[in-house]
Image (cartoon, rainbow, N blue to C red):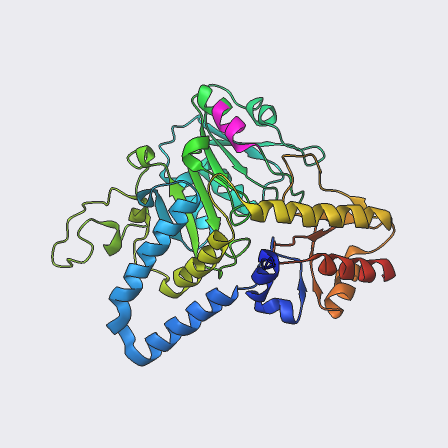
């Protein structure tokens, strides 16, 4: 008699405490903590309260273990990964550390999240122009960005997944075309990491940042920055502190001997508890098959958003997110003609369904632990609004 194997997505669902009280379809905003992440926070808090810094060496070892894990999930070396408090910090470290010359320019998109525009716009005082490319219909192809480039373009900065439209770019194609022109690429990966596979060495991306509080199911304040190793010497070290140097624990030897690793950007004390929680969620995602070249999680998320798109269209909704194969993501934006999206969101919240409104569109963003019943419950409430 054959034994029925457990459903991995139902098992995943049991690891998400929020599933017991809410239909949570808002991972593109702030995700709920996974059960393992909550446990990591509770264990750290107990140790900190009862033992103080006696456990500090243990916490430090765990930080390095999480660094190794985070690096392995994107195909990087641990020396290329730093922990940052948020995506904005990671973008700022590259923007301010890059060796610009007056007259250079950086190319990005006009519909980028503000965090991927303001750091580049802030370079105007250094004579660096920010070129913001307009986007029609939410679709982004490499040529749209490359048409705005010229011989003074030093860097392209773009989101892997658009936070409003949900369009997922072809990273490898963009990087290849940019590198052929001598242009670096920065990837804001916050709306993709945790779901979609990405091998940073294979695709050639130069810099990447992502906070862990969305699809990686970690807490706010614990994210990752990737800097390709050969670029470390190119960037000016910023936020330098006691932890930025090779002799970080020898406080009696004050010599500016900067680490030959991305961890040079971790100038002071680390967010030990946040990194522990992030690591716990990353272990969970890795156990479900997330890897640099493959991700069953991505297939599951695409199935859920496709189901939602089909069912929403059946009740008269207009899908705003492009749905071309190869560009799908966990984000699905839609509108109901004649209906107030804020009122629909309010109604959904009153029924225990969590979603967002962005640019006047309703936006859902299910993770792989969500199920078909969650989508049907959303439909019931939207249909009656």
Q: Main secondary structure of the magenta part?
A: helix
Q: In the image, 229: left or right of 305? A: left
Residue found at x 64% / y 71%:
20
Instruction: Give the magenta range.
Output: 170-176
Residue 230 lies in quadrant: top left
In the image, 262: left or right of 220? left
Please provide percent x and percent y for residue 194. 52, 50
Above or below 50: residue 180: above
Residue 281 seen in the current view: yes
The quarter of the picture where the N terminus appears is bottom right
**From the image, which quarter does the C terminus lie in?**
bottom right
Front-most of residues 347 and 8: 8
At a point 61% along the width and 37% down the height, the residue shown is 110
Depth check: 102 or 116 in front?
116
Which one is in front, 135 or 307?
A: 307
Q: Does residue 209 belong to the magenta stretch?
A: no
Q: Position of residue 340 (x, y in %)?
A: 82, 56
In the visual, does 223 lie left or right of 255?
right
Identity of the residue drawn at 14% across and 53% down: 254
């Amino acid at each position: 008699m054959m034994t029925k194997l457990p459903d991995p997505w139902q098992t995943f669902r049991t690891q998400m405490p929020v599933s017991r009280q809410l239909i949570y379809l808002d991972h593109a905003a702030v995700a709920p903590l996974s059960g393992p992440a909550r446990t990591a926070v509770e264990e750290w808090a107990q140790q900190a309260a009862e033992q103080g810094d006696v456990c500090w060496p243990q916490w430090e070892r765990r930080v390095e273990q999480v660094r190794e894990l985070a690096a392995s999930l994107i195909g990087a070396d641990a020396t290329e990964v730093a922990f940052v408090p948020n995506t904005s910090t990671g973008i700022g470290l590259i923007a301010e550390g890059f060796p610009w010359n007056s007259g250079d320019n950086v190319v990005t998109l006009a519909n980028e999240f503000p965090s991927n525009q303001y750091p580049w716009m802030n370079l105007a005082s250094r004579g660096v122009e920010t070129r913001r490319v307009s986007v029609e219909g939410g679709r982004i192809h490499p040529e749209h960005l490359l048409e705005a480039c010229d011989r003074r373009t030093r860097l392209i900065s773009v989101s892997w997944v658009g936070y409003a439209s949900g369009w997922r770019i072809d990273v490898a194609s963009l990087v290849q075309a940019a590198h052929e022109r001598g242009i670096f690429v920065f990837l804001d990966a916050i709306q993709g990491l945790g779901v979609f596979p990405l091998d940073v060495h294979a695709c050639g991306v130069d810099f990447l940042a992502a906070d862990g509080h969305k699809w990686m199911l970690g807490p706010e304040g614990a994210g990752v920055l990737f800097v390709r190793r050969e670029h470390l010497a190119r960037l000016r070290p910023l936020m330098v502190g006691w932890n930025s140097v090779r002799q970080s624990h020898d406080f009696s030897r004050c010599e500016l001997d900067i680490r030959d690793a991305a961890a040079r950007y971790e100038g002071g004390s680390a967010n030990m508890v946040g990194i522990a929680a992030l690591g716990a969620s990353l272990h969970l995602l890795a156990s479900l098959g997330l890897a640099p070249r493959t991700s069953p999680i991505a297939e599951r998320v695409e199935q859920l958003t496709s189901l939602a798109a089909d069912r929403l269209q059946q009740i008269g909704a207009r899908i705003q997110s492009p749905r071309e194969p190869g560009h799908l993501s966990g984000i699905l934006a839609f509108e109901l003609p004649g209906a107030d999206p804020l009122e629909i969101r309010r109604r959904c919240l009153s029924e225990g369904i969590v979603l967002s409104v962005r640019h006047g569109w309703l936006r859902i963003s299910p993770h792989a632990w969500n199920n078909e019943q969650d989508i049907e419950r959303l439909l019931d409430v939207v249909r009656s609004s």
